[in-house]
Image (cartoon, coloured by chain):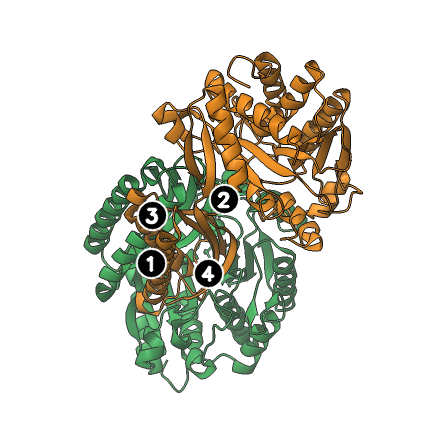
Chain colours: A green, B orange
Amino acid sequence: MNAENSLKVDADRLWATIDRSAQIGRFRDTGLRRLAVSSEDKEMRDLFVAWVREDGCAVEVDAVGNIFARRPGSDPNLPPVAIGSHLDTQICGGRYDGVLGVMCGLEVIRTLNDRSIQTRRAIEVIVWTNEEGARFSPPLMGSLAFAHRLPLAQALDTKDDAGLRFGDELERIGYAGKAPLGNHPLDCYFELHIEQAPHLDREGCDIGIVVGGYKTLALRIDIRGETSHSGGTPMADRRNALVGAGYLIAGVNDIGLAYAAERGRTTSPRIECFPNLPGIIPEHVRLIVDFRHPDTAGFDRMHADIKQAIAAAEAKARVAIEVTEGWSWGTSLFAPECIELLKATAVELGIPYREMLSQAGHDAYAVAELAPSVMIFTPCRDGISHNTTEEIDRARTLPGANLLLNAALKRANRSS
Amino acid sequence: MNAENSLKVDADRLWATIDRSAQIGRFRDTGLRRLAVSSEDKEMRDLFVAWVREDGCAVEVDAVGNIFARRPGSDPNLPPVAIGSHLDTQICGGRYDGVLGVMCGLEVIRTLNDRSIQTRRAIEVIVWTNEEGARFSPPLMGSLAFAHRLPLAQALDTKDDAGLRFGDELERIGYAGKAPLGNHPLDCYFELHIEQAPHLDREGCDIGIVVGGYKTLALRIDIRGETSHSGGTPMADRRNALVGAGYLIAGVNDIGLAYAAERGRTTSPRIECFPNLPGIIPEHVRLIVDFRHPDTAGFDRMHADIKQAIAAAEAKARVAIEVTEGWSWGTSLFAPECIELLKATAVELGIPYREMLSQAGHDAYAVAELAPSVMIFTPCRDGISHNTTEEIDRARTLPGANLLLNAALKRANRSS
């Protein structure tokens, strides 16, 4: 293979699928609100399933709602080459996060169909359920359950802020599938995704081959104080849980700023406060904090600093703070054989690339525990994501789609 | 009158009313959750109305649900001497806050009935609606509407966090009354209340004659940032509204601590955050902050410092902050003639007292704009209030009740 005889996706057809998806759960003009297992999610899933059936795929749905669309290979005994991502979005999400990866997988199948190319191994496009965790926690729910890192019963019993149960909602939209969960070998797993950080966009490079992830940990922080009168209680007698949270949010952000030069990050995305009423000092706050760093040593230094910030907030606000570790992932995730395949294919196609780390969480992190996996990043404008103004340069996205197509084809046809 | 021939309330009967009230909306063993215009509030109101009717009072309810229980005087042309407080509580409230003042008013009427004492002016016990503001904002809703400082339509249209409308709930519990709102002259207004601060309790003094209030202002603070990915967004590109709130809560509390020696106070009791989900940087936080100081000059210095803290949080978190001034009250509230009456009566009864300022908001602040008003404070243990462990020493509460009784009687019978 060389640049001249390589396969290319049908760009117009690919963008038509993205634009059709952008109509389902449209929000604030340019964005999407398509929360996991919502009616919008059902509509998008139904459309995807109809498309892949027209394209000759067999469809399987597992007990957590993951969808597997299989284009058969010539050797039915070999596990499939998988390409996946997600169709759910954040509450103020964009049109590309997740969607682009699924539609590129679909486009790989359609391009192979156009050329009547029979592969040795099957090609499978996977839609993971609830990657975002915006409605039901944790994020990566579908892929974690697939990888046996999240018990099915726990996933099904998760409730959203309105008290609705994940399992009931999954039944309601018709995606509580019969396929056994995770008993599903994969030859390998590819995921194409917008970068969600500004590096490719700013450097003018169109492809990131993702060799690992930032080391990341989320903390659930329970801060306990005591209710009392917001007027009469002397400052020295107060135990305001929200004040404890304020000192901690400020301290955690200061740590993020201190580590910014080495690309450390800290985020406080969510707070719940009780009683949360005027006139009464709050007795309980639950805060989510996450932090990440490109290397383990830096991560460990940040973690120590965050523990100090927690102790400082506890003392200053006279509150009791309890920390529970939540989702996490490490730095060394992806298979050298898949990384090398992408690099070699990019060279053959004559497409410049850079190696990089992912700063966000992805389903590929969970799948990587079961099968050799790798990710391809494509640029997004200014690195903006989880925002309705998320945007891409379509011309700069096609090299990634073509790399995915050619690498998946090679892997599917390899003899060993 | 002297200490020997002064009237005394029936202590056992008074405590029986408090104990009966403590069964309606009981919460966490020793406390109350009796939110305004809830079913528990209805049950307490119905009981109060039944009691005062048995005691020979005429009952009127106005359009915002305030209840007026009138013991007629010999001269029906004179406006009544009023004694009032509230029967609603905080969400984690105590048994005495508000309730004590209403039940002492009831006990005044019952004591006069015991002795068949006919007063020249009527005595009226008033139950103000929604003093706490715990379910429907603002606090002091009933008394502010009575004083024409809050339009009735606005009060009726207020919604709670569940979206229920105040006016509908008032209808539901049967207290949307027919009496015209506020067209109701009062000769004067007395309110007895637990102090909700620890000074009387710690100093061993049983009576505070309230000569004014801390100057107080509540601020509604809208903090606007921008959603983006909690992993990929570089620290320098972030506009996290919750981080803005964190810096501000910390800064506002630091100001409270700096003014603690001169009895300044700052409180952050309530926060709302959107989207408030893991993985996405918040774009909007609405924070309530209140602050108070015993004198106007100190209040003004605090206000200037808080404005600086807002500007600092705005700059550090790269957010936009908008401030709306909410409820407020000043320092000079109460009528010298009423203060002098209480002081003179206390001397006659041989009860030690101290003059003090109120640190909390009270219905008396609103009523004081219409009629000469004053408050009596009684001790509460460690100053704890808005907490289910709120407690009083009953023996140390009786002097206040007897002062109320004798002062109200004098005022009702005065000739001029």
Disc 4 versus disc 1: distance between alpha carbons?
Answer: 59 Å
Question: Helix or strand or loop: what does disc 2 sit on?
Answer: loop
Image coords of residue B130 (percent x, y): 62, 40
**Label 2 in the same subunit as label 1:** no
Query: What's the chain of the residue with tag 1?
Result: B
**Mark 3 to mark 2 CA distance (whole Å):** 19 Å
Secondary-structure class at tag 3: helix
Decide: few, some or many residues near mark 3? Use Cα within 10 Å; few <14, some 14-19, many ≥20. many
What is the x, y in percent for residue A151? Answer: 47, 39
Left or right of B38? Residue B362 is: left
Q: Nearer the viewer, mark 2 or mark 1?
A: 1
- Residue picked out by circle 1: B305
Please, what is the three-letter code of the amino acid marked with disc 2? Asn
On-image quarter of the N terminus of chain B: top right
Q: Which mark is residue B256?
A: 3
CA distance for labels 2 and 4: 47 Å
- Indicate the amino acid at tag 4: Ala
Label 1 packing within 10 angstroms: few (<14), some (14-19), many (20+): some
Q: Residue at x 46, y 52 (%)?
A: B217
What numbered label is drawn on residue A276?
A: 2
Q: Of the residues tagged 3 and 2, which is closer to the observer? A: 3
Disc 2 sits on a residue from what chain? Answer: A
Q: Nearer the viewer, residue A184 or B148?
A: B148
Q: Amino acid at mark 1?
A: Asp
Q: CA distance from mark 2 to mark 1?
A: 24 Å
Q: Chain of mark 3?
A: B
Q: Which residue is mark 4?
A: A82
Between A40 and B326, which is closer to the camera in this rendering?
Answer: B326
- Residue contact at pointers 2 and 4, CB within 8 angstroms: no
Q: Is residue B129 shown left or right of residue A230? A: right
Numbered badge on residue B267: none
| SS at circle 4 | strand
